[in-house]
Amino acid sequence: MKDLRPRDLFNLSFRQELRARLDSGPVVLLAPVGAGAEDLALAEVERAKHAVLLKPTVGSAPAEAISSTVAQVVHDIEPMGVSTFDGNDGRTRRALLALARRYGSKAALALDVARGGNSAGWTLADALGTTIHERPGTPVLVAITNAHRLPGSLLWELRDLANDGQARVLLTTHAEHAEGLLGAKAPLYGNATSVELPEPVTGDWARKLHMPRDSPEIQALLIHTRARAASTIEVAAFRELGMSVSLAWQRAINSRASEAENVLNLAATLNVYAPRLLIAIANEAAPYGAITGAPSQRVARALAKLRDVDLIERGTLRTWQIADPVLHGALLMCTSPYPPNRTGSSASP
């Protein structure tokens, strides 16, 4: 159980179909938070000979995303860190040689960028390394988790790299952001195909978790986690021999308590209504009307900001729900029904 990963829940035929689509053009893998799309992307990166996994952060500017890409590539070359390049032993020489092969005449600049230097003037192709120009017929696999966080200008460049046969592109995102990647005005419109990540069935979970298929325990676990692969594995990891699912769930959400507080503090920097809306949604209360006197337009603005940072998602019957099932449980422990007002210095209504 301790070695179980989300990728283990998706059958070989699905993964082969995903690879076949990647050979034909960019693929956008649609999955909710906690479903395991990120681990599946990592599995494809680990399998490929030439690949890089990018994890853009919320609000990344193009220059920040370029610098992060260079840092990731350099880390892949030398996982022990950039200080290794300052040595005078065999490992250092091998690392410097690999860096030169990857970046050519820009190797020293790449190392400087990886250390926090200026990446002004760099393109995404520069950041990925000259390898993509020197290996015709062997395109690099560029996997990007939460691709909706990547600046639009870089998505357009990624499209060009894919069209030129220099890159195979695998992007993960959530349904809330699909329009921004695939819509009529989006960078990947008409260029990428979308694939929905399948939901593992109860029988798969029973086999992987060594639990009877008709056990009330496994049903309770999947209700808590919405049957999402990464979330379910996270909770199951707390379940020791003979322990009930309810106790494992409590341990899992307890482990997220500090994160829940941090999320509320982050929400306060986004919008003055956002923390109270998070707790209202966690308590399954309708957001409109949850805050006395709050104008509907401002509530809508706050909800949009929470959605944009992947904290909430559309549920059933046109409702909102906390996107991460385990974080949902942790937020319920903070305060109920609503927390005290929290405001951040950059918050706006």
Image (tube, rainbow, N blue to C red):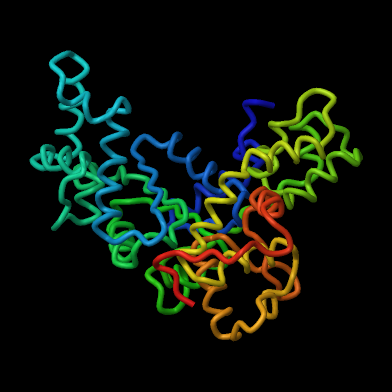
Q: Residue at x 54, y 66 (%)?
A: 306
Identify the image quadrant of residue 175.
bottom right
Point out residue 257 in the picture as x, y percentages from the top left corner. Answer: 62, 44
Residue 304's spot in the image, x, y percent?
Answer: 53, 73
Left or right: where 13 falls relative to 49: right
Q: Foreground residue, 319 or 342?
A: 342
Q: Quadrant of the N terminus?
A: top right
Residue closer to the observer: 222 or 155: 222
Looking at the image, residue 91 lies above or below residue 154: above
User: Furthest residue to the left?
Assistant: 105
Residue 229 point in image, percent of width and height? 66, 44
Residue that sits furthest to the top in the current view = 89
Q: Is residue 85 above or below residue 320?
A: above
Residue for point 67% across, 37% down: 233
| Residue sitting at x 64%, y 50% | 327
> In this rendering, would 114 be left or right of 204?
left
Q: Position of residue 114 (x, y in %)?
A: 22, 40
Please, is residue 37 above or below residue 305 in the view? above
Tag count in the figure? 0
Q: Is residue 203 above or below residue 197?
A: above
Q: Nearer the viewer, residue 279 or 202?
A: 279
